[in-house]
Amino acid sequence: MTDWPNHAEAWRQWRDALSGERMHHGWLLAGKAGLGKRDFAMAAARALVAQPGVPQPQGEHPDIITLTYGPKDDKGEKAQAEGKPFDLARSIRIKQIRAMQRRLITRPTLGSRRAIIIDPADDMEKSAANALLKSLEEPPVGTFFLLVTHRPARLLPTIRSRCRTLRFPVLTDSELAALLASEGLPPDPQAIAAAEGSYGAALRFAEQNLAPVAKVITALLAHGDNGVTGRGELARLIGPRADRERVQAVLDLAQSLVARAARASDNPDARARLINTHTALVSLAAEAPTANFDAGMIPFEIGSLLVAAAPASEPAHG
């Protein structure tokens, strides 16, 4: 998908800068995950490095360097070199920044400009961020940085201060529905609402057919679970052998629905329970990819956390 309705203002600012006398060397592409910032970064970088009269490659461009999550360890690096599957690291590391900086010693290949995309920049290790800061303070001539960020506050203030910010607004429910329909996916209203304006989230929820899961999660939050019937239904819908991608999508959905319920609640005790449940779901989502969980137990763990936030979980007062 390339037609993002929330990119119009960002494109206006970018093209105005390109046509100006002096293009700023550092850019923050800021907004929640799933708003097409990576797509924008790639297209904007191509517009930046294109040299009039010089044919541009359709695939990988030699003057666009993209840094994202690399292999988790030496074993992963070996597997990557051999073209085999490998586990990803959970941060962008200093050696990736150092390798990029070594490339900046040479001139661009096809023109006078080079673009560096870091996605997501807010997941750089502290040492990597400090190393990048040196390049932002003294950028090589013709080098421009596009930092994709979902949580700008996690970036060093000194990095933020050296960049111009392009903000990407969330999508409306009707825009999400239209985008899903264009992909031939059902625009379920409840799943769309849970995506909270993120097309990436809405797409994952639709591809995983999580609308029935959303209904059960909402019921558990509202009414609890007399016995384990509700949690059993949640486990059935998730599946006894759900893969990592499906489990993470369910956890994201649960976090979103719990956060929305917390914002809507005017009961301090209920809001506190929902916030505690959200915190526990975030922790579970962080642990699930690497911890040695029984896959069949994760749905019940999710369900139990949801039930703990329900009104029925309140202690009786005599």
Image (cartoon, helix red, strand yellow):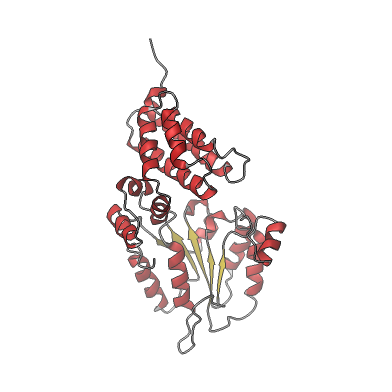
Which of the 4 image quarters holds residue 69? bottom right
Q: Is residue 164 visible?
A: no
**Percent coordinates x, y for residue 270 in the rendering:** 38, 28
Q: Toward the viewer: 278 or 145? A: 278
Q: Toward the viewer: 163 or 295? A: 295
The mark tally for this picture is 0
**Percent coordinates x, y for residue 17 in the rendering:** 40, 74
Above or below 151: residue 21? below
**Outermost residue, left side:** 174
In percent of the image, x 45 and y 38: which residue is there? Answer: 236
**Percent coordinates x, y for residue 170 in the rendering:** 35, 55
Above or below 186: residue 268? above
Horizontal relation, residue 148 to residue 134: left or right = left
Quadrant location of the N terminus? bottom left
**Percent coordinates x, y for residue 26 in the rendering:** 50, 67
Horizontal relation, residue 24 to residue 5: left or right = right
Horizontal relation, residue 296 to residue 43: left or right = right
In percent of the image, x 44 and y 66: which residue is there? Answer: 39
Q: Toward the viewer: 176 or 205? A: 205
Q: Toward the viewer: 183 or 276? A: 183
In percent of the image, x 36 and y 28: which residue is there? Answer: 223
Horizontal relation, residue 68 to residue 190: left or right = right
Which of the 4 image quarters holds residue 226? top left
Q: Is residue 61 visible?
A: yes
**Outermost residue, top side:** 318
Quadrant location of the C terminus? top left
Above or below 25: residue 206? above
